[in-house]
Each structure stands twice: as C-alpha cells, then as structure tokens.
Image: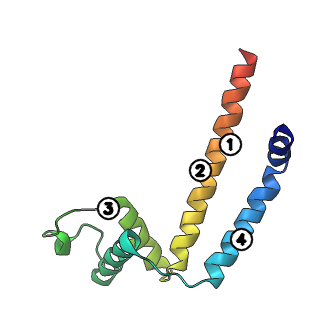
Amino acid sequence: MKKLIDLLTLKIKYIIFFYIAIQLVLIFTSELSYKSDSLYYYNLAEKCLEKNEFYPSNQNINDDYIVAPLYINIIYMLLSVYNSPVIISILNLIIILLQILFSTRFRVNYFQKIQHD
C-alpha cells in the first residue's frame, strides 16, 4: 500500500493532467443536460439574462425562497459573456482545480510544519 501511495504522490502532476484532459473531452463532446437544482439555477440565470437584471430581481419578489444568489449571478455573468452551458462546466472544472491546488498547498505546508516541530 505504501508503494502505491508513493507512486501516486510522485506522479500527481501526470494524474491531474490526465484528469483535466478527460474532463475537457467530456465537456466538449457530451451533451449537457441539467436536472433538479442545476436546471432551476440555470433557468433563473436565463430569466435574469432575458430581463438584463441580477438575481434576485423584481420578478423574484414573490418567490418562496431566494436560492444561491451568488452562484446564479455568476452563471448570469458567464452567460452574458458566452451564452452556452459549456462555460458553466469549464467554470466548475476551474473551481475543482483550485480546490485541488489549495488542498495540496495546505497539506504540504501543514506537514512540513509538523516535521519541523
């Protein structure tokens, strides 16, 4: 098991590159279909794009809930620049990569600090 962990940590750059390549192929070749919450957020962002207003707008005053305003406004801004659902998948990939970067930086800093103490 230790050999497998050592192999994976040594080859992490290759694994991340392979992950990015697979994700980009899937993003650009598969048909995107939103369901449940994703579909609801996408529809809200499209309605805001039609009205040219940020969420929550006047049309949402009587809604039962104001849901995820930051995320819907980010989707609204992305759709106003490049009106395709592909851009949302690219943003999600970038967010995942940032999470990987921050967690590896934290891990390296934390464990180096423990070793020196």
Whole-angstrom CA distance, mark 4 to mark 1, is 21 Å
Q: Is mark 1 on a helix, strand or loop?
A: helix
Q: Which of 36 and 89 is in front in this view?
A: 36
The residue pinned by badge 4 equals 22
For image coordinates 32% across by 61% down, the residue present is 69
Question: Which quadrant: the C terminus?
Answer: top right
Q: What element carries label 4?
A: helix
Amino acid type for the residue under numbered disc 4: Ile
For image coordinates 12% across by 70% down, the residue present is 62
Question: Which quadrant: the N terminus?
Answer: top right
Q: In terms of sequence position, does the residue under pointer 2 or pointer 4 come before the other?
A: 4
Amino acid type for the residue under numbered disc 3: Pro
Amino acid type for the residue under numbered disc 2: Gln
Mark 3 neighbour class, 10 Å CA radius: few under 14, some 14 to 19, many 20 or more: some
Q: What element carries label 2?
A: helix
Residue 16: mark? none
Whole-angstrom CA distance, mark 2 to mark 3, is 21 Å
The residue pinned by badge 2 equals 99
Q: In this view, does 37 lie to the left or right of 113?
A: left
Residue 104: mark? 1
Mark 4 neighbour class, 10 Å CA radius: few under 14, some 14 to 19, many 20 or more: few
Amino acid type for the residue under numbered disc 1: Thr
